[in-house]
Amino acid sequence: MRRRAAALGAGALALAVLASCGGDGDGGTPAPAPGPLPSPSATASPEPLPSPSASPGVTGVSRTTIATFDNPWAMTFLPDGRILVTEKGGALRLVTAAGAVSAPVGGLPAVAAGGQGGLLDVALDPAHATNRRVWWSFSEAGSGGKGLAVARGTLTEAASGAALSDVRVIWRQDPKVSGDGHFGGRIAFSPDGKLFVSAGERQQGAPAQDLSKTLGKIVRLNLDGSVPSDNPFVGTAGAKGEIWSYGHRNPYGLVFAGDGRLFESEMGPEGGDEFNLVRRGADYGWDAVSEGSRYGGAPYPRHSTNPALAAPLIAWTPVISPGGMIQYRGTRFSGWTGDFVLAGLTAQGLVRVRVSGGTATDAGRVALGARIREVEEGPDGALWVLEDGANGRLIRLDPA
């Protein structure tokens, strides 16, 4: 996948850059290369991870196509078994397990769709069963360009259709910048009821290290949008109090495991996609270090060159281009319970990661022959995936 520039012609290099941006095909350009590298001895490339073609306990999957969408990005199951699906262009739709798709849900604020931006994640409030509240992330326009935002509203349904009422934008990334890449945008709720959001660095690079900005950060908030007093940088001069961790690039997976720990996956540059255990106040290194390379250039310094930086549990080269991520809690897929399952765009399927204490292994792949943007677990333990693109299918997966 991500070969050196010297071996590429101009056309092939353009394709390589596209793939190393996660292969989104969504527009945007790589961030400018930072300053000079340390000596080659400090930046040697790690050995690529193997790419297993089969997963222990699963010999194959059966697929049932449910519905088709225009650039779907995320989904979540409602308590009654229906599914909320976002389309990047700005539509939120209700879908039955049988494939009936609603008109767009009303009441959403304006979305600045384009490139990798648009209507992104959707999640149910921890108390959704009683308050009917829904959360979503999206890119919005404003002074200086575009930025990530997170909103919530109450889902209401009537004969005329579904809508969101009492809509409130809870958090906005700061600052807004030009361009349409690296929004991140995943939402997760901690066991103690805090809101976590993965915010991409918007292809800006160095601001991921700047605590006065929320580019390239994971943020932690109370559900009313206020900053928890025990966040790591509260009281630090010039720092944004909502920051929980920093030095992230383009984080597309964010999951609280059953043991309460937070895990994240993100796209690397040319190589070096990451699976991380997220720790309070930790710096994950971008764009000072990476397990990948500069676009068409030399490797970045590796995490091992600075032990103060948090290294990924897994770094993928060749890349998988991770999309959504879950921790599988069911039993329908034998041997998978407790494993993390990542949607793979470049991998064109699912990637399974097994965590044991503080280590992780690439435990298996399920090839699906299409770019997979999102994965969720259904109420009965089946897996549901969204294909990427203008005619992206919602597909139910069962063990064959």
Image: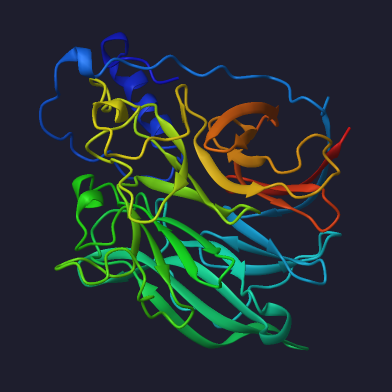
Camera-side residue: 264 or 91?
Answer: 264
Which residue in the rendered view is the most extreme toward the right? 400
Q: Residue at x 38, y 56 (%)?
A: 280
**Considering only vertical position in the picture, is 273 above or below 198?**
above
- Residue 391 appears anywhere in the view: no
Count of residue discs? 0
Query: Could you say which quadrant of the image residue 308 lies in?
Result: top left
Q: Residue at x 37, y 15 (%)?
A: 3
Q: Is residue 140 left or right of residue 388?
A: left
Q: Residue at x 65, y 27 (%)?
A: 363
Q: Is residue 58 left or right of residue 34?
A: right
Residue 302 % position (x, y):
29, 26
Q: Residue at x 39, y 20 (%)?
A: 2
Q: Is residue 331 left or right of residue 266?
A: right
Camera-side residue: 193 or 251?
Answer: 193
Q: Is residue 175 left or right of residue 278?
A: left
**Considering only vertical position in the picture, is 39 above or below 240?**
above
Residue 322 % position (x, y):
52, 39
Residue 86 % position (x, y):
59, 62
